[in-house]
Image: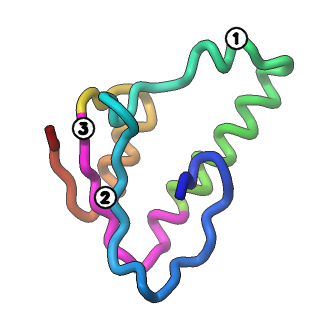
Amino acid sequence: MNCFKRPCIARPPAIRAVVLTGAGKLFCAGGDLPEFAAADNLDAHLKVMTTHLHAAVSRFARMDAPLIGAINGTAAGGLHPRLRLRCDLGGRIG
């Protein structure tokens, strides 16, 4: 489930842990600059994006299941420290 793009639903009882990792070679590399450049209204785009990011980090903080950070590759950008510190257990993979 991608908590950054849509609201997360409540954790079903069968989920005992959540693994947070990046797609491809990057764990977290900052903002998507081409997406920012293509936005018709950058202020509105940033507001929507930060609202989703805040909701995901808030959900991670409130959920019952442990959050495991599987950090693959580069971990840069302003959000990385908050994500990494929010994890109950984490380490570099690959």
Cβ atoms under marks 2 and 1 closer than 8 Å: no
| Above or below, 12 relative to 78 | below
State the CA–CA distance, disc 3 to disc 1: 27 Å
The residue where tag 3 is placed is 72
Q: Quick one: 66 or 81, which is closer to the camera?
A: 66
User: In this picture, is 10 found above or below 32?
Assistant: below
Looking at the image, tell me whether mark 2 or mark 3 is earlier in sequence order: 3
The quarter holding residue 32 reads top right
Q: Which residues are magenta?
A: 59-72
Q: Quadrant of the C terminus?
A: top left
Q: Position of residue 23 (x, y in %)?
A: 39, 38
Q: Which residue is located at x 34 percent, y 27 percent? A: 76
Disc on the earlier residue, 2 or 1 = 1
Q: Which residue is mark 1?
A: 37
Say above or below: 33 vs 78. above
Task: Determine crowd level at label 2: few under 14, some 14-19, many 20+ residues with C-alpha closer than 10 A.
Answer: some
**Up/down of 81 relative to 54, above or below:** above
Q: Amino acid at mark 2?
A: Cys
Q: Amino acid at mark 1?
A: Ala
Nearest-to-viewer mark from 3 and 1: 3
> Is tag 3's residue or tag 1's residue first in the polypeptide sequence?
1
